[in-house]
Image (tube, rainbow, N blue to C red):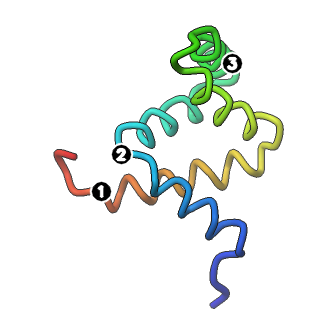
């Protein structure tokens, strides 16, 4: 069995650095239908306090394959999270 690619390992490490609530919100937004997702990202971007979060979500919008990998990783992390976290 082949392990994750170095880029995927780096992405997993970067995601692990975020609190579970942030990862859950990322997953929620990234799995919205296209129009709702764009609107929600725009709302985050419009608020200076959440602009950097919006920028994290914009990059995967430009590459559906990256978004799919990111969603898969976030779902896996959520499964491994203890309930009540």
Give the residue displayed 48% in from the left and 32% down from the top. Answer: 28
The mark lying in front, picked from 3 and 2, is: 2
Between 53 and 30, the one lying in front of the other is 53
In the image, taking residue 1 as reference, residue 7 lies left or right, namely right
Give the residue displayed 52% in from the left and 53% down from the top. Answer: 15
In the image, taking residue 39 as reference, residue 75 lies left or right, namely left
**How many residues crowd around disc 2 within 10 Å: few (fewer than 14), some, or many (20 or more)?**
some
Q: Which residue is mark 2?
A: 20
Answer above or below: position of 82 versus 1: above
**How many residues crowd around disc 3 within 10 Å: few (fewer than 14), some, or many (20 or more)?**
some
Between 17 and 39, the one lying in front of the other is 17
- Tell me, yes or no, whether the two marked residues, 3 and 2, touch with CB atoms within 8 Å: no
Q: Which residue is mark 1?
A: 81
Q: Position of residue 60 (x, y in %)?
A: 73, 40
Answer above or below: position of 25 versus 37: below
Give the residue displayed 44% in from the left and 47% down from the top. Answer: 18
Answer above or below: position of 2 versus 59: below
Give the residue displayed 35% in from the left and 38% down from the top. Answer: 21
- Tell me, yes or no, whether the two marked residues, 1 and 2, touch with CB atoms within 8 Å: yes
Q: CA distance from mark 1 to mark 2?
A: 8 Å
């Amino acid at each position: 069995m082949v392990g994750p690619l170095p880029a995927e390992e780096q992405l997993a490490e970067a995601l692990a650095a975020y609190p579970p609530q942030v990862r859950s919100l990322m997953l929620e937004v990234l799995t919205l239908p296209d129009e709702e997702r764009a609107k929600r990202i725009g709302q985050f971007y419009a608020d200076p306090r959440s602009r950097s979060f919006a920028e994290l979500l914009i990059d995967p919008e430009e590459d559906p394959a990256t978004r799919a990998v990111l969603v898969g990783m976030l779902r896996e992390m959520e499964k491994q999270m203890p309930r009540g976290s």
